Amino acid sequence: MTIRPALCLIVGVAFFNSHPAGAQQVTKQDVPGAINFTRLETTVACGGATKPEAVPEIKKLGFASIINLRQPAEPGADIDAEAAAAKTADIRFFNIPFNGQSPDPAVADKFLDTITAPGNAPAYIHCAAGNRAAAMWLIKRLVVDQWDTDRATQEARALGMTSTTLQQFAVSYAQSHKR
């Protein structure tokens, strides 16, 4: 059985001030080098494993940065090739290794600093399957956008968060890290 990475895209008008009523309309889109690309409506995309050849298309879609949450030792994680493709495509690239089995609040701190830094939005956030990317987006929604937990969790699940451990980490982090 092949596990296909889920890609979820949120594109819209206001990155920090958009507060939709709940989960948003989902539409599928074909993107070369990306499997299961799904579009929602804000200015972030969350996804799974992304090949370097997908980077130019991500740039064409209007993204200013890529935040890769994969650890360098993960099978199939070619961070150097993705970073080189980002440089060639003139898109900012950040590798913030996040261990989903042992989540570290310092990684969430670095992620929030990166996602909220001027010039990094809109951002494409990815890991291997989309689970960690969606969990980090959940943290952003809770801490920065101050969404309620149910609403933010519903969106994170639509983006590919399946781990109850990561969900619990995100909620606990948000409760102890106010901005």
Image (tube, rainbow, N blue to C red):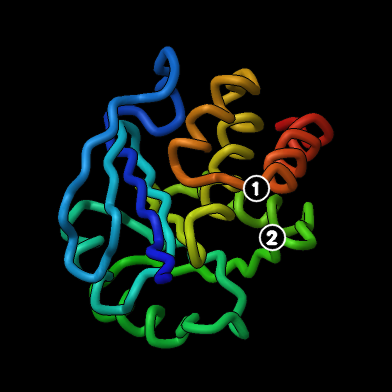
Horizontally, residue 40 falls left or right of residue 131, namely left
Outermost top residue: 21
Real-space CA distance between mark 2 and mark 1, rounded to the nearest whole angstrom: 9 Å
Q: In the figure, residue 49 lies in which quadrant?
A: bottom left
Mark 2: which amino acid? Gly
Single out the residue that lies furthest toward the front.
Answer: 1
Q: Are marks 2 and 1 in contact (CB under 8 Å)?
A: yes
Residue 119 showing in the rendered view: no
Residue 45 against residue 142 in the figure, above or below: below
Return the residue nearer the eye: 44 or 4.
4
Q: Residue at x 25, y 80 (%)?
A: 88
In this picture, residue 101 sits left or right of residue 140: right
Quadrant holding the N terminus: bottom left
Does label 2 or label 1 sit earlier along the sequence? 2
Q: Residue at x 56, y 70 (%)?
A: 70
Residue 100 is labelled as 2
Mark linked to residue 163:
1
